[in-house]
Amino acid sequence: MTHDVNLGIGNASGYFYHAPKDTALPASPLETLGTGWEEVGYIAQDGITWHTGRTATPLKDWANKIRRQLQEDSTGTVEVPIISTTAEVLKTLFGEDNATETAATTAHGKLASVDVEEGVVSAEEAFLFIMKDGDDAMMLGTTSGLITDVADITFAPGDAITWSATVSADKWTFMKDDGQKTA
């Protein structure tokens, strides 16, 4: 069943993906992802928040009436709370060169680690979020985005470790597929 009012429920196959910069977005949210796309990790229950970045400055006349709106240069962002703690998450958030994964040995399991220094940022990448609600599928993605912020991380008993990141991009694409194919 298709809906005009949708829930922003993540697709159970992964939720959050990344690929090298300029990797093409899928033609439909129902399309199998092409080469290069990798799952980053699971998103927390509260989901993602898209800030479109559309702001304007009003120009007022002498009578204090708005006569024109000047669009400001601004970047759209997606706030994404990731609840997976893996080498892929660390590489995505802190840069491929700063995170490592070491194979399991007889002395320890597989190790994921990151060295965080001031000013370290990840490289530009393509990012994709896929949602599904009944037959409807939606996606939000960019072919060139950057992790511009990683919020404070709390390590507390009873709470999932959440890596709250901000992905910034000049251009975002949102698409909905109502799942109703023609015969």
Image (tube, rainbow, N blue to C red):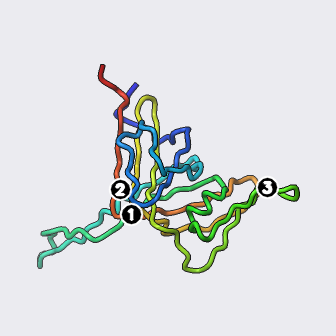
Instruction: Name the kind of residue labelled 1 in the image.
Output: Ala
In the image, what residue occupies the spot 47% across and 48% down? 35
Decide which of tag 3 and tag 2 comes sooner along the chain.
3
- Whole-angstrom CA distance, mark 3 to mark 1, is 37 Å
Residue type at mark 3?
A: Ala
Q: Quadrant of residue 157?
A: bottom right
Q: Residues within 10 Å of mark 2 (few under 14, many from 20)?
A: many
Q: Is mark 1 on a helix, strand or loop?
A: strand
Label 1 neighbourhood size at 10 Å, few (<14), some (14-19), many (20+)?
Answer: many
Badge number at residue 172: 2
Residue denoted by label 1: 169
The residue tagged 3 is 104
Circles 2, 1 touching at the beta carbon (< 8 Å) = yes
| The one of 43 and 86 positioned closer to us in this rendering | 86
Q: Mark 2: which amino acid?
A: Trp
Residue plotted at (59% across, 48% down): 42
Distance Cα–Cα, label 3 vs label 2: 39 Å
Residue 91, image quadrant = bottom right
Callout 2: helix, strand or loop?
loop
Q: Residue furthest top?
A: 183
Tell me which residue sits at (42%, 64%) in the image: 168
Q: In which quarter of the image is the C terminus?
A: top left
- Numbered tag placed on residue 65 in the rendering: none
Indicate the position of residue 138 as horizontal and vertical percent values: 40, 41
